[in-house]
Amino acid sequence: MSNKNNNTNNLFKVVAQNKKARFNYEILETLEAGIVLLGTEVKSLRKGNMSLQEGYIEVDGNELFLINTHIAEYSFFGQNSHEPTRRRKLLLQRKQISKLTEKVKLKGTTIVPLKLYFNNRGIAKLEIALAKGKNLYDKRSTIKEKEAKKDAEKALKMYRKTSI
């Protein structure tokens, strides 16, 4: 007897990632948010045409909006396609929104998008993070840690090759 659906709950297709966010910011807390999209935007996302690099999240009253992210126009739709850098509303519970806005106002933190993906049900989700900006020396230490980890893995790999 085989379990086909054993790992299907953890499967999702990552459309876009903001790798610079983890380098430029110290991530304090992450959340999963829904996002309001048009049909042509969803079709374009399924093709992988999105960039989160310049994106940020803005608080407007009791709502959160994704600003300055680029979803390319869907080529098969023609002239009536969506605007590539329009404001997109994020869907969160009221308690989550109020908690985030309080933390942004008090601590001098910001909300950044980390990645956009389709979950196992085919719904587009955006992983957002409450983040605090890193200083230059923090960024240098991050680079040193990555290099040290890379060197250690390389040495371990060489050791394994010679011991066989």
Image: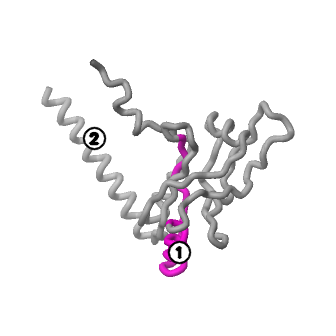
Q: CA distance from mark 2 to mark 1?
A: 41 Å
User: Could you say which is closer to the camera, residue 92 or residue 74?
Assistant: 92
Q: Is residue 99 magenta?
A: yes
The one nearer the camera, 98 or 162, is 98
Regarding residue 134, the answer to whether it shows in the image is yes
Along the viewing direction, whichever of 126 and 19 lies nearer the viewer: 126
Q: Quadrant of the N terminus?
A: top left
Under mark 2, the amino acid is Lys
Residue 51, percent from left and from top: 63, 48
Three-letter amino acid code at disc 1? Val
Badge 1 element = helix
Tell me the residue at 74%/48% (across/down): 84
Q: Residue at x 78, y 45 (%)?
A: 82
The residues colored magenta run 96-118
Q: Secondary structure at mark 2?
A: helix
Q: Which residue is mark 2?
A: 154
The mark lying in front, picked from 2 and 1, is 1
